[in-house]
Amino acid sequence: MTAVLDTPPGAAPARPAAARPGKVLSDTLVLTRRNLLHMVRSPFEPGIAVVMPVVMVLLFGFLFDEVMSGHGAGSYREFLVPAMLAMVMVYGVAGSATGTARDVSREVMGRFRSMPMSPVSLLTARTAADMVRACLEVALLLPVGLLLGWRAENGPADAALAIGLLLFFRLSLVWLGVLMGLVMPDPDASSMIVYPLAFPLTMLSTAFLPADAMPSWMAPIAEWNPLSAVVSALRELFGNADVPSDSWPADHAGLLAVAIPAALLVLCVPLSLRRFRALSR
């Protein structure tokens, strides 16, 4: 706060020196608490993000169960639950992008940067708060799946691996959302651009339909869709029904489900930090 008072009017805020890891951690915890409080006080957007997948699980699970069970996927509800878990992770990008853009547009980050805290903690706190939200979304959706008859057939160890893979996927998407919020510091624009991108990604995949139930031109697109690999890996770890396929992405779904989020992190984290430093100048 002293740095704020000492900064002359119109002058750029002083750039704090590199902080120690302990300082970064403590600042991150403080700012994470701030972001979580914002979610609690403005529950509409995170609430919709959680409720919509639950509604879709119930609608899809009951309406299409009998029709889709004839495509070799066993129970459609069992086929559907891993897809809905992945879908919740994808649509979480909107919250990360909007939250980051809102902070930038309100110049909150400029105020924080003028204070004696680690600049990196501003971004790590955003990702930490969004990961807490992701855990809550998974914790809410899994009991709904259990009520519909879904089960983790391979036991708790593989189920824990599946949830870990799911959260790793979300972490990469959170950083993608942070980058989008920094590039487009308009909360409305950041939110609106996510859905036109996420909707085709989820629909043109094997998340809801097996590839052999799609038109011939669409099946290869769905098989090579990164989301298809994540969903197939989840079904395999949970021990749920999946549609047999001899395509290369289907045979290497586990490898792709790890490699794709890792590639996103390698790309988005440095770009986000670079963009954040550019906004600080």
Image: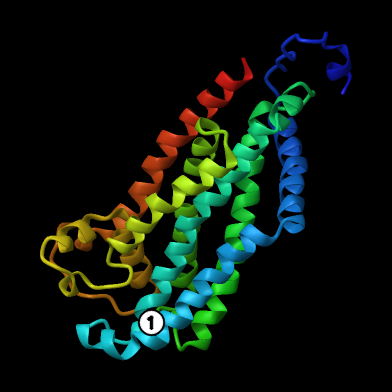
Q: Quadrant of residue 15?
A: top right
Q: Residue furthest left?
A: 216
Residue 195 percent across, percent down from the top left: 44, 53
Q: Is residue 38 left or right of residue 187?
A: right
Judge by depth and name the residue closer to the eye, 170 or 46.
Answer: 46
Q: Quadrant of the C terminus?
A: top right
Instruction: State the count of labels.
Output: 1
Answer above or below: position of 252 versus 68: above
What percent of the width, then of the height, locates residue 227? 33, 58
Disc 1 marks which residue?
Answer: 78
Residue at the (54%, 39%) spot, across then down: 178
Instruction: Determine whether 1 is above or below 46 in the image.
Output: above
From the viewer's side, name the closer residue of 58 and 243: 58
Identify which residue is drawn at 82% across, 10% down. Answer: 9
In this image, 100 relative to 247: left or right? right
Q: Is residue 153 left or right of residue 143?
A: left
Is residue 138 depicted above or below 181 in this figure?
A: below
Query: Dot 1 lies on which element?
Result: helix
Categorize mark 1 by other alpha carbons within 10 Å: few (<14), some (14-19), many (20+): many
Q: Residue at x 20, y 62 (%)?
A: 251
Q: Nearer the viewer, residue 278 or 72?
A: 278
Residue 13: percent from the left, percent from the top? 74, 15
Q: Quadrant of residue 50?
A: bottom right
Residue 75 in view here: yes
Q: Is residue 239 visible?
A: no
Q: Is residue 89 left or right of residue 252?
A: right
Kind of residue at badge 1: Glu
Residue 135 is situated, as x and y percent measured from the top left of the image, at: 59, 62
